[in-house]
Amino acid sequence: MSMLTLAQAKEILPKHTTEQHLFVHAAAVSAAMGAMAEHFGEDKAYWEAIGYLHDVDFEKFPQEHCHHVRELLNNEPVDEEDMENIIAHGYGICTEEVQPSSNLQKSLFAVDELTGIIHAYSLMRPEGMEGMEVKSLKKKFKDKKFAAKCNREIIKNGVADLGMDLGDVMACCIKGMTEHKAELV
């Protein structure tokens, strides 16, 4: 089977998702994953596709997130590796099934929540994503009341698992999300 494409991911997600904020989140994570792929010298298009589809079962099964990925994607052009890449982002949060082991899986785990903080910050800045700096983002990250639903511990654990500096992961996410800022409104 061929590797999942972003076009395929954008066809599949609307079959299981209706809420606009989830499409914006999908676009944000996809953009961040593309930048992470570039950082690691990996397949940007593939990482973007996995990022876009990562919450495929979230709207239908919010209490059982990551437990219904296979049943929803079974009849789609998605192979077992794709499904494991998606399921891994819930490791230790909502599933114990697939522990993140590849750079792709670890990146998805790390950037999922982080994109929420970055997006929230962009919405309060007059210039949006444009010109966002890691230094100012770190201040927002330290403010536990800001984007309070985004779990900082998950982000820190994911970044540590990648063996990267938080600022470097933030820089990748800012870069990717800035390139796709038109999709994040």
Image: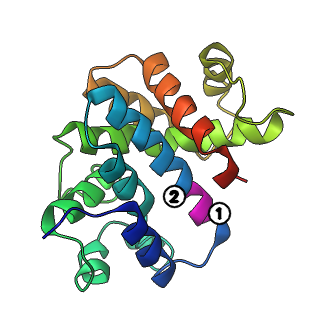
Query: Mark on residue 21?
Result: 1
Q: Residues within 10 Å of mark 1 (few under 14, many from 20)?
A: few
x, y percent for residue 183: 65, 54
Q: Which residues are magenta?
A: 21-25
Q: Quadrant of residue 120?
A: top right
x, y percent for residue 84: 19, 60
Asked which colour scheme the image uses, the reply is rainbow
Q: Quadrant of residue 104?
A: top left
Query: Which residue appears at 16% of the width and 41% of the height?
Result: 101
Q: Which residue is mark 2?
A: 26
Dominant secondary structure, magenta: helix
Query: Which residue appears at 68% of the width and 25% of the height?
Result: 140
Q: Is residue 45 magenta?
A: no
x, y percent for residue 46: 30, 52
Label 1 element class: helix
Q: Relative to 155, is 166 above or below?
A: above
Q: Quadrant of residue 175?
A: top right
Amino acid type at image mark 1 = His
Query: Which residue appears at 44% of the width and 59% of the height?
Result: 52
